[in-house]
Amino acid sequence: MNATIDNLVTIYIDGSAYQVKAGGHLLETCLGLAKDLPYFCWHPALGSVGSCRQCAVQLYQDAEDQRGRMVMACMTPVAEGMRVSLSATMASQFRKQCIEVTMANHPHDCPVCEEGGECHLQDMTLQSGHTQRRHKGHKKTYHNQDLGPCVGHEMNRCISCYRCVRFYQDYAGGDDLVVLGSRENVYFGRHQDGCLTSHFSGNLAEVCPTGVFYDKVVSDSYTRKWDLQSAPSICSHCSLGCNVSVGERQGQVKRVTNRYHSQVNGYFICDKGRYGFAHSNSDQGLYQAQVQPLGDTKKVTCDTLHGLDYVAQIMNELGAENVFGLGSPRASVEENFALQSVVGKANFYAGHNAIQDAIQTQVLHQLTQPDIYTPSLKQIEQADAIVIIGEDLLHTAPRMALSVRQASRNLGFAKAAAIGIPKWQDEPVRIHTQNQLSPIISVTSAATDLDDISSQCVHLAPNDMCDFARALASAVEGQFDGSGLSAKLHEQVQQSLALLAGAKRPLVISGASSQSPELIDLAAQLALALGRQSGSEAWLSYALEAANSMGLGLLNKDPKHVGDLALRVQQQSTPSALIVLQTDLFALSTQAAALCENLRHLVVLDQLPSATSDQADVVIACASSFETEGTYVNNEGRAQRYFSVHDKQSRPDAWRSLTNLAAMVIQAGPCSDAVTQLASCTKFDDLCHLVSQQGGEFAHWCDVAPSADFRIAGMKIPRQTHRASGRTSLYANENVSESKQPEDADSALGFTMEGTPINKPSALIPQVWSPGWNSNEAINKFQQEINGPLKGGEAGLRLLDISPNLPLAAAALIPSITIGAGQILAHTQNHLFASDRASALSAALKQRSTVISARMHPDTAAAMGLVDGAEVCVALAQAQWLLPLTVDASMAVDLLLLPSQYQAPISAGHLPAAVNLSAVTQEVN
Amino acid sequence: MNHGQSSSQAVTLPLSQHIKADGSVTSLAEYQANYGYQGLAKALSMSPSEVVDWVKNANLRGRGGAGFSAGLKWSFVPPLEKLPGQRYVICNADEMEPGTFKDRWLMEHDPHQLIEGLAIAAYAVQADTAFIFLRADYDLCAERLQNAIDEALAAGLLGEQLNEAGFSLTMLMHTSAGRYICGEETALINSLEGKRANPRFKPPFPQVSGLFGRPTVVNNAETLCNLPHILYHGIDWFADLGLGDDNGTKIYGVSGRVNNPGCWELPIGTTVADIIALAGGMQEGVQLRGFLPGGGSTDFLTRDHLGLAMDYGTIQAAGSRMGTGTMILLDDQTCVVGMVLNLIQFFAQESCGWCTPCRNGLPFIRQILTDLEAGLGEHADLEQLLQLCGYIGIGNTFCALAPGAAEPLQSALKYFRDDFVAHIEQGCCPHGNSPQVDMDLEKEARPI
């Protein structure tokens, strides 16, 4: 939003007049004006505390005042007519002296420091002008702690800026990283060695202005920032679409860091996004096509084109109408679209089970209702009351949990504003607010990470959640009679109603992990009721299953899921084939085995092996999101593009394999227009153009990011930094003559150093750098204003804003679950670091995955004769799962929570279901 | 307004009038026998705003060091109609300023005087809860204060329904965990809340958002001890006690090589020379060279200033501060470098670690002084020391700790520069000192 003339003030900096936004402080104002002013303790997301004293400026009373007085820019609100100097001798000497004393104990171990070359402390030291060390004493040395597999600790480098604890505790709600000691001996760490428990701990590496907290995974196979080839990417681990920057060297992804998007992830990502990249380097991945001709017992590897040719033959043999495609919520829109084109819309099914499909249909219907708006993560932070229903956000949409945490402070901001304390005055706001938080009502099956900021925590079984949501919605509408509700639930609804009474900007959050389409609907009804009560648009946000659930939903509005497919294949009289895109059928549905039985051919396009690829007779290895380009549509309907970081592809793009397949199909004979059009695509932009021709939400698909012919000053945007080294020797072991850098015909990014490091379109910023700003703090040079959009605008396109209300398509009726004798209703408990195969391949995350156990309320356990820690056997259909039982008093009764775990005998896709549960008795010999 | 009782002409040293020579504590009965708790009774018969005005007009200046008008401080608390709800008063009895032991003297011997004063302050700002934040080491004070609180409560002088308007007061004593920074009022509040004792940014001032985010007044113990007498005897009486511009009496103290170190109540504005005379003068064979007039964080003054009146304005005009009014003397046989090193060491150790100039600047200075004292200094060090004093000076730091710490050093460099130069040129301490810094601090165990 542009500032109106009313809230602009004129200030004078070193004699020049500037019109700036009122209400901010001098530091952010100066940085926003592209001035260089050093700082340590201030962080754009954490606000000001005035501890480092590094941003001192001279403030003058009026035009006559020549002497002035020194103030800390970060603690000084801008005011009309204010006169300041950044260059005044007193202030600049002070800043220099600050660095001198700050550096007295710093080990100057830059050559071996992980932060070297992208160190804010290095940058600020140079900026301050301090060059001569005068301190003669010994340096202090500290014990470094083992903080687990993700974050390294090198306390000697600490300059005591307090950012780490302010992020970890105040911003992210962690409680195991603290400041200990006092005076020159303050210590930032844990009370004892041990893994940091926050799921956002990796951000410490970016928040720390020097190398105290560093990315341990990067450190294991280190590359300097300037030597990383980087690409803008979108995290593929959940539906929020956090923007990330991926860095590689010599074909290996080295690291993932936050890439600023003002509306999505801001400055922070979760640890799964940061550390869950190992699958891309994994030797367990699929790298070669494999074909198992009929009658053979083993797959043989072949090149991709050969494999595709085999698929084309299958298609010709069976006839197009007998070839089905199963898309994936984890694959890009372009990949899904290409598969849909190959098999035809009628034969395209979503990689969803019936419940997931019904949920997706509900989500699209609700979010396109005219009275409903789905906020971005940044907007979620503006909500003044939030009802979370049926979603354990930390494990399903972690960055959203962080936004909810920020929203909980709005009451405090308002309270502080009433006595004139601006929002950025971090400590005064917290002190004045104390523990008062905006109402957050958390309705989940068991305790969650957000319970500490929730005004009301209600732990209910899924069906009761529906009753709760229905009752609360009617109570908000003033039509609550409470009949049919238990006394306890009645009281809980009343309590929620009271908490929500004064809300002006209420928000309802729900999501796919409830596994209840009904709850998705009821959440929307509640949001609408609250919207009417507050006289504003209803705000509703859903956490979805996967990175591109929304994109797949929009492509597959006439929902068909794996159950429909199984039925159709079963009923087919002719032999059929299925092409599966990045999906493990066995994790999705208990019908998978039957489906595979009925197929003549099973073709899998994937980057990692799965039970499905094991069953397949053709496997086409395809690139992960780090090696190809594509578009995910996030949970708010924002289409965002990612780009390949690798110059040497180890396996082809899935979209290209599918266009190649189309071309092969054409050669064999007449085929549909869709196949013909797909076959004509030689570049990614051609495919995007084809996607856009579908119209509707996809009409502006080519605007999601600049096309491959975009140039600045005739040059592409470099993936490498202008300081990249070793270009001529990097592959000298393979070939001594310098090979030509590969061309990238599919994006406006080049695999070179040449090109401008600044003024890039927002979607095409591989990494941030600006003269004198080598660390991620350089982002201030890319923003329109501090915390504002990037200079190139908000990247991506919100599709649902232009969408008409999508009808609630006739989704499959979800049969109600009958709980038989000796059975119990089982639901999924998500675990951020254990739930999926991509993160399961990250050694760092694997170490951090929690102990896997089934959970149950003590009363329920007692009724079933089970005790805490007992080994139990959970049986569903043919699957059996032995695992320990944890008794959890926070849970709803009559419910079993099963961990969502990669390769578990019973996966999230099989639940909810009635399962048999029995204690495993030790056999006595 | 009636400005005082008519029968008050005799009392000239009110604060110490109950202090007995044998060091025993004044009981409630003894205290009440001599108009004890009548000041509070008088206050309770007035409206709170009348009490605020009364004290404002008495011009009682804060005895903790800053000298800010107590009544004016109270008046910044928003009126109840504007900001209803909880408010607090706190007695700052965290007396840790080097060379200062005046509050201890008052609290150990006459605890009811403080309790009555604190109750008056609580009434004035409509606080129903008052805290005494007591220095960790003051065990005897803690015992005697707690006994006195219990006595007052049992006698109905504290507790519920203290006047017709229904004023009630709970008084709680909190013994500090022992950090100098807790004497800084906002760090004190943080500490009382159970947080790290870091000072808070102002604004908001504690009067608006203090303890637990509520309006809070923090007054020094000696300041509060004046209140019963001001209420009882009146403003004119109080004004007549002072010799110069300031009103009332002051507890002055002297430490150093005098014959009779200690503290005494004297009219505010008594001269430095008279106070030192009361301390029995210098010990035989030693000459006075200078003095820190009001504790370890005030600038040195010299023999030239002996005739000055010890009041806020006069001492400030001479380039120092009256501070706590308890002076530390420097004699000709004591090494000034060693003395300031000792002080800097104290302040470096007591830094809370929040802001850079204090946390890292003070140890930086300590290093240079340690080298100087060991005879390893260079002439350039003196220039650097002055630079560093400026660096940690007023306005540059988060609170007043480091600027206070700079005061003895910067003035020592001004008045006793020859001593510093002698260290450099002779390559050792002319007084034969070796550095007194507890270098163990450098090696201390860190969290593991």
Image (spheres, rainbow, N blue to C red):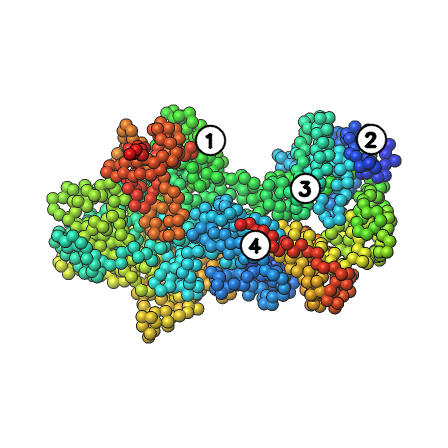
Q: Do labels 1 and 4 share a chain?
A: yes
Give the foreground label among 3 and 2: 3
Q: Which corner quadrant of the image does residue A544 belong to? A: top left
CA–CA distance between discs 4 and 3? 27 Å
Give the residue number, with chain letter if any, for mark 1.
A495
Give the foreground label among 1 and 4: 4
Answer with mark 3 or mark 2, whichever residue precedes in sequence. Answer: 2
The location of residue A126, given as percent across then percent down, is: 55, 65
Q: In this view, does A104 lie to the left or right of A313?
A: right
Q: In this view, does A534 lie to the left or right of B84?
A: left
> Looking at the picture, which amino acid does disc 3 mark?
Ala
Return the chain for callout 4. Answer: A
CA–CA distance between discs 3 and 2? 31 Å
Give the residue number, with chain letter if any, for mark 2.
B34
Asked if residue B14 shows in the view, the reply is no
Q: Which corner quadrant of the image does residue A820 belong to? A: top left
The label shown at residue A160 is: 4
> Looking at the picture, which amino acid does disc 4 mark?
Ser
Q: Are marks 4 and 2 on the same chain?
A: no
Give the residue number, with chain letter if any, for mark 3.
B136
**Label 3 neighbour load within 10 Å: few <14, some 14-19, many 20+:** some
Identify the residue at image location x=30%, y=57%: A283
CA–CA distance between discs 1 and 2? 57 Å
